[in-house]
């Protein structure tokens, strides 16, 4: 199936939720032509015919998304998973600091876009980094550690009166309506030779495909309407690389991201990391790219 993007906003009547649906063109190349991959209960998933970017079209309006992520339940779950999440962040922090040292960036300034409850920034602060964040959810800000400078609102509204050595975007880009615009803004906020780290779910996760064939798991690009997350974009290693390069970044390292908070998930993360180091192929559930400002 295929189609073309329409320029319209309409009220959704299919699930009677009362939010608007907006049609959009490909954020990477601007094409309006796409193939329909999936029609789940909530939102349709399409793939750009020109560049291959996978995205939701039509998608919920931004008013609904902001309300969705301001629900207390979304962040209350994070506190229940505190031990597993801390182990996840420890692994990410160790790798990040190592890559920063390799690129002559040591204990500088760091900005985390979509910092949530601030676990990552707290760990970086303990290591001597000057930490700042951005966040749109007031519920998340209520749980944020004191002493961390946070801009409330989308990064596009942040004034360029300060520049950073490192900017991180941990599993946030896929939720944003205009990820290319966000990456361009991040570029403007980086110091010369500054570094950016972007981690997103892997649209080509081969571990999931293996499980699908062995235990008949069903592939879901987007969670159902009862999910705690809405992914507007589904990046592959290739599509994320292209978007970051278009935003003015030079790729310096690609890796498997390790978002697992349970023992089983961390086990799969370790397997995926081993395979990537040997073959260069990411079979994991998430991917990560380090890049420098051109």
Image (spheres, helix red, strand yellow):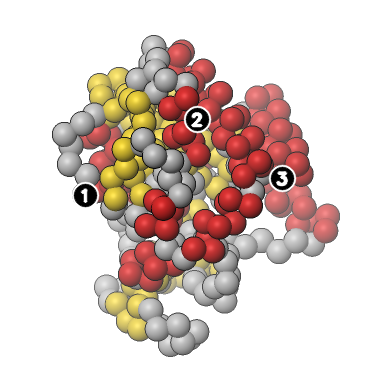
Q: Residue at x 83, y 58 (%)?
A: 215
* Callout 2 secondary element: helix
Q: Which residue is drawn at 41% across and 35% down?
A: 168
Q: Residue furthest front?
A: 146
Figure quadrant of the C terminus:
top left
Furthest-right residue in view?
A: 214
Q: Residue at x 49, y 71 (%)?
A: 44
Packing grade of label 1 (10 A; few <14, some 14-19, many >=20) is few
In the image, taking residue 284 as reference, residue 211 lies left or right, namely right
Q: 33 or 232: which is nearer to us? A: 232
Local secondary structure at mark 1: helix
The residue at which mark 3 appears reads as 262
In this rendering, which labeled residue sits more in front, label 2 or label 1? 2
Disc 2 + disc 1, Cβ < 8 Å: no
Say which label, 2 or 3, has the lower sequence index. 2
Q: Mark 2 points at which residue?
A: 123
Query: Looking at the picture, does residue 103 appear above or below residue 155?
Result: above
Q: Position of residue 272 (x, y in %)?
A: 69, 35
């Amino acid at each position: 199936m295929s189609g073309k993007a329409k320029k319209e906003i309409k009220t959704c009547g299919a699930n009677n939720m009362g939010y608007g649906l907006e049609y959009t063109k490909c954020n990477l190349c601007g094409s309006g032509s796409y193939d329909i991959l999936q029609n789940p209960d909530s939102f349709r998933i399409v793939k750009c015919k020109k560049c291959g970017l996978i995205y939701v079209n039509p998608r919920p309006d931004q008013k609904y998304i902001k309300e969705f992520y301001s629900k207390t339940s979304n962040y209350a779950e994070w506190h229940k998973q505190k031990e597993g999440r801390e182990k996840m962040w420890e692994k990410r922090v160790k790798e990040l600091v190592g890559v920063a040292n390799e690129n002559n960036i040591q204990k500088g300034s760091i900005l985390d876009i979509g910092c949530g409850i601030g676990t990552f920034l707290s760990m970086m602060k303990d290591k001597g980094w000057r930490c700042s964040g951005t966040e749109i959810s007031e519920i998340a800000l209520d749980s944020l550690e004191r002493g961390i400078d946070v801009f409330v609102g989308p990064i596009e509204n942040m004034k360029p009166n300060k520049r950073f050595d490192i900017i991180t975007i941990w599993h946030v880009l896929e939720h944003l309506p205009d990820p290319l615009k966000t990456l361009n803004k991040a570029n403007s906020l980086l110091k010369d030779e500054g570094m950016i780290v972007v981690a997103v779910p892997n649209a080509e996760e081969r571990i999931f495909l293996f499980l699908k064939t062995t235990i008949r798991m069903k592939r879901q690009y987007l969670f159902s309407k009862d999910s705690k997350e809405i992914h507007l974009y589904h990046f592959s290693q290739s599509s994320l690389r292209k978007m970051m390069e278009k935003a003015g970044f030079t790729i310096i390292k690609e890796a498997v991201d390790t978002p697992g908070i349970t023992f089983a998930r961390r086990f799969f993360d370790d397997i995926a990391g081993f395979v990537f180091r040997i073959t260069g192929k990411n079979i994991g559930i998430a991917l990560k790219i380090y890049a420098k400002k051109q």
